[in-house]
Every structure is written in C-alpha cells, then in structure tokens.
Amino acid sequence: MSKVFGFSGEGDFFCRDSICTNPKEANLFLSHGHHLDVYFPPNKKSRVSAPIVLRESIGEPTRVSIEVLPDECLFEILRRLPGNQERSVCACVSKRWLTLLSSIHRDEIHSDEVVSRTAGDFNVINEEVKDKTLTEYENESDRYVSRILEGKKATDTRLSAISVGTAAHGGLGKLLVRGSNPTRGVTDVGLSAIARGCPTLRVLSLWNVPCVGDASLLEIAKSCPLLEKLDLRHCHLVTDKSLAALAKGCPNLTEVTIDSCRNIGNEGLLSLGKGCTNLKSVSVKDCPLIGDQGIAGLLSNASFILTKLKLQGLNVTDLSLAVIGHYGKQVIDLVLENLCNLSERGFWLMGNGHGLQKLSSLSVSSCQGASDIGFDSIGKGCPNLKQLCLRRCSVLSDNGLVSIAKSAVSLERLQLEECHRVSQYGLFGSIMNSHGTLKSLALAKCLGIKDFDKDVELHLMISPCMSLSSLSITNCPGFGDSNLVILGKICPQLQNLDLIGLCKITDSGLLPFLDDCELGLAKVNISGCINLTDEAISALCSTHGWGLEVLNLDSCPKIGDRSLAAISKNCQLLNDLDVSNSAVSDLGITALSCGDHLNLQILSVAGCHISDKSLPALKKLGRSLLGLNLQHCNSLSHGSVKFLLEQLWKCDIIY
C-alpha cells in the first residue's frame, strides 16, 4: 500500500467530468445504504481532512477503517490497483467497492505496468472471483467470456460485476440480456459500466430492457470498437442517435437486428448504410418509424456488402421492393414478411430490377401483393434462386407456381404453407416442370389440394423428376390415395418422406407408392395418418427396411404389435422409432427386443398400453438406447420406472 499513498503532487490525482450537472444531486454518490448501485465522481475533489480519533480510555485506541475515506479518495486508491486479479478481489469487498471499480474507465487506470488488451491479446488468468448466478460460456477459439443475464438476474449490480470480473479472463466478448428485474432492472448505469470495463465486447444483445436508452449505447460506441453484432429488441428508449454513434464508432459491425424499437426511424438505417462499411446482415421488424426512405438509404449506401436482409411488419411500399431489386447486388438471403402495403407491381419491379443476380434464398409471408405475375418476374430475374418459401400468399395460384418452377432454373427447395389457391394441378405441375434441380418439396396446410379422380389419373401425362429426394406433405386434408400413387410415379428417387396428418391416406395408396420408390426410403414420418394399418408398415419394412434409419408412427391407432415384429426382423439400421399413441402393447415391445441386430438409440412409446410385463424387453433394448419416452404409460408401475432408471443409467428416460 506504500506505493498507493506515494503521491508526488496534484498530478497523481485524476480529475474527470461528472455525469451529474447539478452539484446538489448528492444522492448519486454511493453510500452505505443498500438501495444504490452506482457511483458518479464529482467535478472537483473535496478537501479531505484526517479523521479525528477519539479514545474512550488511555491504552484503548479506536480502530480506523479505510471505509471512512470519502468516495473520491477510495476511487484514487482503486484505480491504482496493479492488475485485473486484484480488482476482481476488491470488487468482492462490498457493493460500494464494486460500484466504484465499475465506474473506472480502462483509460483511467493508473499503474506502473498498464496492460493494453487488444483483439488478439486474450491471455486467460486462472483465478477469478465469479458471480455464480450468471450463465457463463467461454469461446475456446477466441478466448473470451460470454455471459447471459435473464429475468430477475438482469440487474445493474451484476453488470458491474461482469465489467470488473471478466477482465481477468481476457475480456467480455458476448453479452446477452434477456428481460430485466422488475424492481431494479438493467438501466444505462449498468450497461455503461460494461462499456467502461469491457472494450473487447463483440456481441451485444438486449431483449426487453425498457430502461436502457441512448446514454449507455453512446458509451458502447465510444469504448467498444470491436463490436460486430448488435441485437436490439423492445428497447423503446433507443433512438437514431445511438445507431449513428455505433455506425461511427464500431467499424467492425457486421450484423444488426432491430425489433420493436418504436423510436428508431429512417435516419438510423441511413447512418448504418453510410457508416458501417462491413455491414452484411440487417433485420428490421415492427418499427413504425421506418419506411421507404430508411430502406432506400440503407440499400443505396450498403449495396456492395449487404448479403442478408429481413423486413417484417414495416410501413413500406412498392418503392422499397424496387430499391431492393436495383441495389441488392450482393443480397443472398431475402425475407419479406407481413408487409401489407405491397402490390403486384412491387414484386414485378423487384424481379425486373436485375440487381438480385446472387439471390439464393427468398421467403415471402403474408404479403398481399405476392401474385402470379410477380413471382414469374422474380423467377426470371433471380437466376441463382435455390430456395423459395411462400407462406400465406393468398393470391398465388397454380399458374404462378408452375411459372416460377419453369423460370427459376436453379430452384432446389420449394416450401408452401397456407397457400389455399394452389391445387393438386399446381403441385404436380411444379414438380414436372422443374429443371432437374428440385431436391426438396414441402406443403403444409394447403386446403386447395384435392384428391384426383381415377379417370383423371389414367390420362395424366407423367414426367418423372429424378432429382427430388425429400417430400413433406403436412395437414392437407384433401390429399388422398390417388395423389400419393401419382407422386410415387413422378418421384422414384425419394429418400425422406413426411406424410403428417393425412386422414385420407390408406394402405391402398401407400402400398403402390412404396413399390415405385426405387432408391429406398431412409426417413419416414407418417404420424397422424389414422387409416394406415400394420399391413402397410410391414410392407414398408420388408421393402425399405434395409436402409430405414428413422420411423415415426405417432398417433396411428391402427398400427400395433405386428408392425414392431416386422421392424425387429427387417430394420437393422433403424436408430429412431416413435410408436407413441398407437396400438402397441407388451407383445410388441417383446417382439421388438427379439431383434438380434437391432440397434435402437431413441424409442418413444408414450401413451401406449404397456405394463410391467415389458420390463425385461425394455431392459434388453436399453443396452443401446440413449433416449426412452415412457410418458402417459399408466399401466407401468412406479417401481418398474425406478428400476429402469437404475439399470439404464446411460439412457435419458422421460416418464
């Protein structure tokens, strides 16, 4: 401590401006009370007088503590601590010391040996006093610490502890705040402490922190030049001023997400476009002040670097789509969702802008202007489009779907959800008119798809698609056996098949479909197909069992023990089996365990009528199991479950 008090004059003391403009705001200084978390030093140093020591009697002097020193003196002592480890230890002394230490900027630390930590200098010190209530991660490749604060744990005090403590571990690299303590949550005070003590911060994510505003983000922009990713969600006090400062002070910023920030507008996006020369990804959602001007400013200034753009719930018009189509020269991934003011003209302009030459993935959801003409234009104007996802596009019809299949010569993945004007003609037309590149097709909740009549099926010109390997049809109530038979003929190379919730599918449709699959099925999910029976599953196992890896028969009430016997006999490579809520009983579990070469890792029998009689079979199956679901097996006693928990210690059992 002799060095600490070895002052040579006034130059040894550090004077800095006070955050408090009113000198009468004495309550901003940390006292011994429990209700304050922060210390702000004043403009001027107070004159310090030596404490008067009173003696009660001769020979019994009263002990004098360092705590009698005012905050100004204690601040001068703490900023002269020799290293990060010493600062971490001192932070554990009291809340007062922690707050004082967290108020010290890295540039204010006065030491004989000042260690300057840069992006590459992350030498980890083994000992640190840590707050065990924090969720902690450490990035082994970059050697920086990541912290997550959630709910009631998100307070200014913990942010101050992070600011002081993580320096000994190479610096804080990633901070995620999810929610805030309702009584003493995160404010600008805590986040400013992070800015002062964590210049190595790279990722900052703030969700639902209503008391954080521009003041702390201005500190982040000033003190954290390595920041790369920024995520602001429901931060209503943050304005364009913060984005302008971050764009100027953080040249490495590459990814920005703004969600439900009602005070961020066009000027903020314009600042990002002008100042962030490395910006590659921008996501904007539900910001009422952002419109065409902001999107135009962002795209026109960042057109040569921006690769990913997501716009959701904004008051933008066709002008924004025209700007994207013209300036989005490097955009690879584009998401447009819930943009109610768009029309058919906007999508046509975007496709004819000839700027989306590198666009690989496009997702359009709940946009009323997404019509046949617009998608035809997009297909022609985006030659490298490989993935197309269309959700709740009520205007799209069969003509538009077939047209985009013809014009998008590189399309590999097509997904449709709640597109009710698309019928079975559009479905099969898009498959047969693809250019031999379509690999995956998924339909969900498309009510316009109906089953073909037999007469129509006989006269249908069938052109097989040899590239399609994955097919998923979910909750399309009109899809039936005739459609399934046709799919088998035009998709002979299928390997992954999902037929979920299709009540019209029966054995009559699945059996011929299985015969037409030439390559062999590896993953099959027919959950919720209530009219399929053991006959279809037995045929599946005998025909494709040699390569079957995943089989889901959940909620198929007509499938029972006979199917498990066929699985045990034919499916040696099967590792994931789900027979929940089916007719499987103890006999089926016993038959399944008789498979000599069966190597199941995941087994779910939730809701099945199995009892304690299945205990030996489950124990035998458990030699290879890693996961077992026994939920709602009411006939299985608690003692049997306890026995399985003891015996199958390598297996995660849900009961």
Image (cartoon, rainbow, N blue to C red):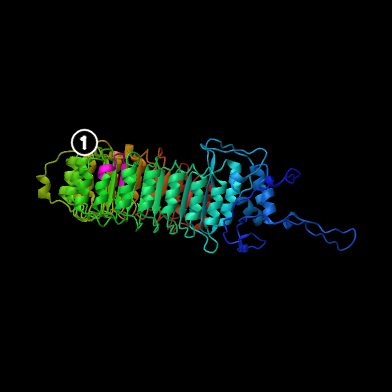
Q: Secondary structure at mark 1?
A: loop
Residue 459: horizontal and vertical position, in percent? 9, 45
Residue 623: horizontal and vertical position, in percent? 48, 42
Q: Could you tell me which residue is drawn at 64 percent across and 56 percent down? A: 95
Q: Is residue 71 left or right of residue 153?
A: right
Write down the region rendered in magenta. Answer: 325-334
Q: Residue furthest right?
A: 58
Position of the N terminus by quadrant: top right
Q: Quadrant of residue 94?
A: bottom right
Q: Nearer the viewer, residue 361 or 532?
A: 361
Residue 144: horizontal and vertical position, in percent? 54, 41
The amino acid at mark 1 is Gly
User: Mark 1, residues whose alpha carbon is within 10 Å: few (<14), some, or many (≥20)?
Assistant: some
Instruction: Check disc 1 and report the residue beneath it.
Output: 436
Q: Is residue 473 above or below residue 182?
A: above
Q: Is residue 186 left or right of residue 499?
A: right
Residue 605 lies in the magenta stretch: no
Q: Is residue 293 left or right of residue 95?
A: left
Q: Nearer the viewer, residue 391 or 629?
A: 391
Q: Nearer the viewer, residue 377 or 445?
A: 377
